[in-house]
Image (spheres, helix red, strand yellow):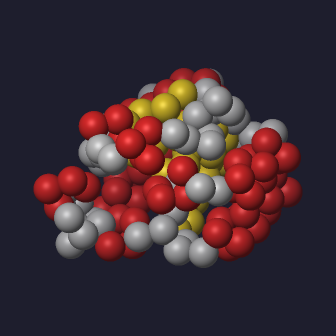
Amino acid sequence: MQILVIHGPNLNLLGTREPEVYGSRTLAQIDADLIEMAAKAGVTLKTFQSNHEGALVDRMQAAAQEGCGYIIINPAAYTHTSVAMRDALAGVALPFVEVHLSNVHKREAFRHHSYFSELADGVICGLGAQGYALALQYVLGRMGAAT
């Protein structure tokens, strides 16, 4: 069993970028926690971050070819703009959970719309880094992994 966590643009700046909005944990810390949590359940978890839309689309397509069972994705700013990423997720037909560190509904109006939510199994927003762990817990349960 394999899970892929995809992080969109600017998430490589976590820990230093607007910590009052996104928290103080780095992306490396979040990834390490998720990898450990998955390993304890006997599941392989891979992570990928890019600031480039095409690279994110390519990674989604590769995940399907690699036999990935589930995706956890924080599309970041592409949430509100990327039809290409939405179409890639629809095209690979892998189940996924959408995660956002901040509560996008408490922010600017343009952040209230997601191109991904209608396809997602679920959406977690506003819970900071804990949102990723909650998404992983859900995915592990759906995959029948021991948690």
Look at 35% across and 35% down and name the residue there.
105
Look at 64% across and 56% down and name the residue there.
82
81 vs 34, nearest the viewer: 81
Residue 88: x percent and y percent? 78, 53
- Residue 27 higher or lower than 136, as above or below: below
Q: In which quadrant of the rendered image does the N terminus lie?
A: top right
- The number of discs equals 0
Q: Quadrant of residue 107?
A: top left
Residue at the farthest front position: 109
Q: Quadrant of residue 140?
A: top right
Look at 62% across and 41% down and name the residue there.
116
Task: Look at the image and tell me whether residue 45 can be seen.
Answer: no
Residue 138: x percent and y percent? 50, 28
- Residue 125 higher or lower than 100, as above or below: above
Residue at the farthest left position: 20
Residue 23: x percent and y percent? 20, 55
Q: Is residue 99 left or right of residue 65?
A: left
Q: In which quadrant of the rendered image does the C terminus lie?
A: top left
Q: Is residue 112 left or right of residue 52?
A: left
- Residue 50 higher or lower than 104, as above or below: below
Residue 98: x percent and y percent? 53, 40
Task: Look at the image and tell me whether residue 26 can be seen.
Answer: yes
74 vs 144, nearest the viewer: 74
Q: Is residue 104 left or right of residue 47?
A: left
97 vs 78, nearest the viewer: 78
Look at 75% across and 67% down and name the residue there.
58
